[in-house]
Amino acid sequence: MIFSLKKLTILVALIAVVVFGYIIYASKMPSYLSSDPKACINCHVMNTQYATWQHSSHAREATCVECHLPTDSFIEKYVAKSVDGWNHSVAFTMNTYDHALKISDYGAKRVQKNCISCHSSIASTVMTNADKYHNFDDQSGVESGRKCWECHQSVPHGKVRGMTTTPFNLGVKEVN
Amino acid sequence: MKINYKVILPVLVIAIISIVALTSNIKKNEDDRVELNKTPEISFEDRADNEKWARYYPRQYGSWIKTKEGDAIHDLLDTKSQLSVLFAGYGFAKDYNAPRGHFYAVQDNTNSLRTGAPKDDNTGPMPTACWTCKSPDVPRLMEEDGELEFFTGKWARYGNEIKNTIGCYNCHNNETAMLEVHVPHLDRGLIAAGLPTFAESTHQVKRSLVCASCHVEYYFKKEKYTDKAGKEQIAKVVTLPWKYGLTAEGAEQYYDEVGHTDFKNKISKVPVLKTQHPGYELFLTGIHGQKGVSCADCHMPYTQEGSVKYSDHQLQNPLNTMDRSCMPCHRESEEKLQDIVSQKYVRKDQLHELAMDNLAKAHLEIAKAMEVGATDEELVEVRSLVRKGQWRWDYAVASHPAFFHAPEETLRLLSVGNDYAMQARVLLVGILATKGVMNYSAPDFSTKEAAQGLAGVPLQDLIDAKLAFKNTLEKEWNKQAVQSGVWSEEMKVRVESADENASYIIN
């Protein structure tokens, strides 16, 4: 009896390996280890974000992950990638996301840090002058506590975010 | 270690069930994605009819039709009268207007005095190749008749087939709307230059290459072939001279190698190379080209309308759309940027006038030398210098504002071109002196009338013949195009009502 149970288990394990292999393929799992912006439109939810980025001046210099993930530490980057990956997978699978995407506080902090790391001279000017205008609690590195895009509203995605906002975008169709 | 199969087996089974459930969920979502990314399909028969795309792409179509607003007629022969001397004996001495919006492409080609006044399919001065960049009907006809067949015969042959102006099918696939070029000369040029083909290029590069299918330097290469009826034919095929690079010097080297000359100047017998419009080539040498900006980035800025964003298809001067074209990248004020552009124009125009004056004088001084007995042998070097000089000047100014796209290259070409003209004129002083002519001063070419007089252009005759053609054959073409379903009645009315414009009609 134990012998045949063992055999059965091995057989089932093999099946499990095969279906796991298939899901790696079907979910395009390896693409998430890359920094290719097209990985972000493996599903359709971020089509608008991709299209607006692709038409922006930031598309010449920065990919999605260069703004949205920590860039100074490999470990922090993969922690963030894992947290986002889990949240996105759950939301997408369970269909619990809104059709107008909004960034999380955790995500916003990371983006703000990356704004500053590229545009540091501008950020330092803002910090020097911050006390002359508003001095909110420091939460993010810029002493006003506000986010860059509260003023620079169009950078880089524009003011639209709806899922049907960029119909027939040619760049999005590149991945087909 | 003892393995507890009674635990592992159910765990594995649960894992498999979960994975299968997840896989089916992924499959469903993937189907959603494909469905959402799908574009409406335009049938193969309808591909060249811009109106047929309108119902699926209302915003793109609505902005595209606004190229009608670019309707100003600017007669360059009037403001740059030297042109009639430089192009004496060639179509551009007759009629040379600054280009208008894409809406007018077919109509301006038809109205130009350069295309003459054909009486039927087999008359007129121009070959079918002159239509190549004007219409989505061109790729349709190439697909229907064959490329070499398309490039055979007179321009008038396709007058009733080519009616839809530059539109959707010139840049887009009719099933997917992806960027696609349907004329084979672009890929042949890219391959000759050792560059990636259109299909191999990135999306960003394609956003320029669709424009480069027309806004480039080209010539009509003669190709012998046997047609379907077994008859020997000669096709005049649009060909890009890119074998030695996308530069003025590279194209010149290619043309010299194949022995190409566009025309012999009627005044001076100089074998002239006429530049078409190497807008793309020059753009690549400029700072925007080198930084990887595409044509569409500035000329088709991303635009918000209500809650929807799309690429503006009203192709025009980006200075009209600075907030969307320039300001997303530049921090300066619009006024400051405009001042910089104006400054570039002024600099170019000074050298532009200088080079044209010297080239025109060189042509007229050669004519004087011929008049007093200079032989062709004596004039070989002078004519070669004028050919080189005129090629460089023309290359710098024939395309859409190269002074903006590539100011350094434009000024370099104008300076070098002017230097060749001056070298020729120095030699001419010597040649004229040996014939006893001292201090010769070329006749006046400061007005269109004076210059066309020197070039022997019978302007009024050309206009009369053109207007007669417009009243007869062109009307017939328009009628036939609507009857055969090539053109919509609505578009015919729209175009005909906007057809009161040509420099000679205004004047």
Image (cartoon, rainbow, N blue to C red):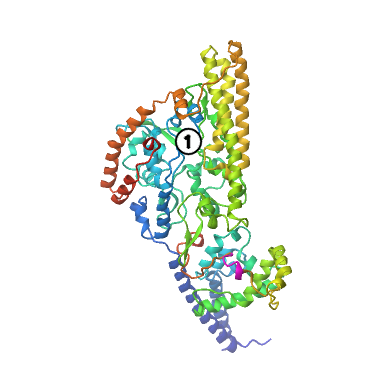
Magenta run includes residue A153? yes
In the visual, does B43 lie left or right of B440?
A: left
For disc 1, the neighbor class at 10 Å (few under 14, some 14 to 19, many from 20) is some
B447 and B278: which is toward the camera: B447
User: Residue B364 location in percent, x, y?
Assistant: 53, 21
SS class, disc 1? helix
Residue at image position (34%, 39%) is B158
Above or below: residue B319 compared with residue A3: above
State whether residue A31 appears in this view. Answer: yes
User: Mark 1 = which residue?
Assistant: B76
User: Residue B326 location in percent, x, y?
Assistant: 57, 55
Quarter of the rendering containing residue B442: top right
Q: Which residues are magenta?
A: A149-155
Q: Quadrant of the N terminus of chain B?
A: bottom right
Above or below: residue A5 compared with residue B387: below
In the visual, does B43 lie left or right of A21?
A: left
State whether residue B202 appears in this view. Answer: no
- Number of numbered markers: 1
Q: Quadrant of the C terminus of chain B?
A: top left
